[in-house]
Image (tube, rainbow, N blue to C red):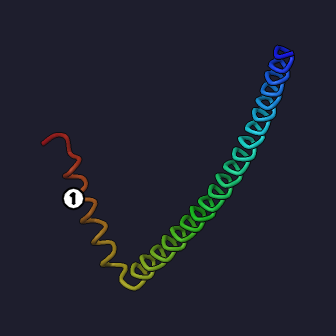
Amino acid sequence: MAERDLNKDVDAIKSDLDALRKDLSNALETIKGTAKSRAESELDALQRRMNQIATDIQTSGRDSLRAVEGQIGEKPLVSVAVAYAVGLMLGKLFDHRR
């Protein structure tokens, strides 16, 4: 009879361990799903921020280009002289015949 009780106890422990294993597996799947969802959310927020930064850079670049075009339009001779001087300096800088 003691052996029968022992076998029942062992079977109950095995059953409890199987239930615990299933519960742990379910908990891990839930944690995994939550972590994945949060990572996707963070990635989406980061992508939106990067898109906003890219838009800001494009806007700034266009504004700078318009300002340079305006300066060139206002003082074309000075602009040509500056471009010529910059060209001469770059030519000297990259001249390999020194």
- Quarter containing the C terminus: top left
> Residue 78 at x, y = what percent?
30, 78
Vertical comparison of 55 with 95: above or below: below
Q: Quadrant of the N terminus?
A: top right
Question: SS at mark 1?
Answer: helix
In the rendered view, tell whether residue 98 sits above or below residue 17. below
Q: Who is closer to the viewer here, 20 or 29? A: 20
Q: Nearer the viewer, residue 60 or 95?
A: 60
Residue that appears at 33% across and 72% down: 80
Q: Position of residue 55 (x, y in %)?
A: 58, 68
Kindly identify which residue carries mark 1. Answer: 89
Residue 89 placed where, x, y %? Answer: 21, 58
* 66 over 33 or under it: above or below: below
Q: State which quadrant residue 90 falls in.
A: bottom left
In terms of depth relative to the viewer, which is nearer, 54 or 89?
54
Q: Which is more toward the observer, 10 or 58?
A: 10
Residue 37 vertical placement versus 13 (above, below): below
Q: Residue at x 51, y 68 (%)?
A: 57
Q: Is residue 35 left or right of residue 88?
A: right
